[in-house]
Amino acid sequence: MSKDIKDIHSYYSPNGLYNRIIEGLNEIGKDLSRLTLEDLHPVDEFHIRGTTATNELIQLCGFTSDMHILDVGCGVGGSTRRLSHQLGCCVTGVDLSDEYIDAAERLTQLFDMQERVKFQAANALDLPFADNSFDGVWSIQMNMNIEDKLAWLKELHRVVKPKGRVVLYEVCGNKNTPVYFPVPWAQDSSISFLLEPDFFREVITSAGFEIEVWNDKTNLAQQAFAHMKEPVGNPELPELGVHLLVGNDILTKAYNLSRNLNEQRVSLIESVAVKP
Ligand SMILES: C[S@@+](CC[C@H](N)C(=O)[O-])C[C@H]1O[C@@H](n2cnc3c(N)ncnc32)[C@H](O)[C@@H]1O
């Protein structure tokens, strides 16, 4: 593992994650034998606008029940499970973090979805799959940690079948710099690599894709974070939340994200790219 990759891995490696999620569920009185996908959403949809965004991507993706989809940078698998649940397709999720993958697998077993939803620890820059393996690819807010975006997109291009669609929902840079840190995907600039949307678009086409959909969702992201205030002291955190994934300074990270959005330092892009 290169130093960069080790640092990213260590940022996303909380100890005992699955047990902490189960404790959180118990504390809020959830019965594990009757759990719904919605019960996990405070912790398992780790991206801007959570389930609302996932549902919009499901509407957009054009995937069907007979397909096998790859979710790259799947985290603990909230949107991986939701995609399969809504469309009936098989989804394989990969993530750099062994701790997230362990939690993803065990949470999926709670829903008895393991036949159709599988997980594997892997680096998005070196995917352990043959060329043309998947009918489609889905990648939600993970490009921020990827310095070599062309290599990442070429990997997606390699593993998706011809005519396959690649759904991306990604934080990009914007016209102003620098970005305020920490943010939800990085403690500091050493593991955060943002391109302005126009450059991101160019890299996607350089990797061999044709862009079919390109939506700037920055306004919706701003609205979603409009309530954020600078945290004072050590505010109480809910039993279940993404602080379990990336630390108790999550409110500072969310506040900085809102400042970055409002001051045009970051943007949010939704895209569908097709392999010709
Ligand atoms: C902000 S989280 C998003 C997780 C998930 N897509 C979601 O929306 O809930 C970013 C994820 O990207 C993963 N990641 C970062 N760099 C990666 C890499 N090189 N290969 C695979 N996963 C990576 C992280 O481990 C983390 O789970």
Image (tube, rainbow, N blue to C red):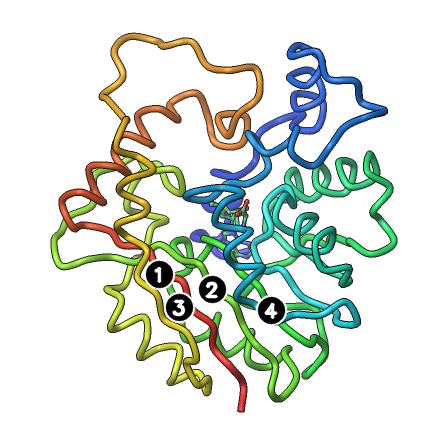
Is residue 272 shown left or right of residue 55? left
At numbered mark 3, what does the secondary structure look like: helix, strand or loop?
Answer: loop
Q: CA distance from mark 3 to mark 1?
A: 18 Å
> Percent position (x, y) of residue 251?
35, 24
Q: Which mark is residue 137?
A: 4
| 250, 61: nearer the viewer | 61
Do residues under tags 1 and 2 come within 8 Å of each other at their CB atoms?
A: yes
Count of marks placed on residues: 4
Location of mark 1 (residue): 269
Which quadrant is home to the N terminus? bottom right
| 71, 153: nearer the viewer | 71
Q: Is residue 92 above or below residue 226?
A: below
Q: Is residue 210 above or below residue 137?
A: below
Between marks 2 and 3 in the image, the one whose residue lies nearer the viewer: 2
Of the residues shown, which amino acid type is indicated by label 4?
Val
Of the residues shown, which amino acid type is indicated by label 1?
Ile
Of the residues shown, which amino acid type is indicated by label 3?
Asp
Q: Which mark is residue 168?
A: 2
Residue at image location 56% in from the left, 68% down from the top: 61
- Which is nearer the N-term, disc 1 or disc 2? 2
Q: Is mark 1 within 8 Å of ligand 1?
A: no
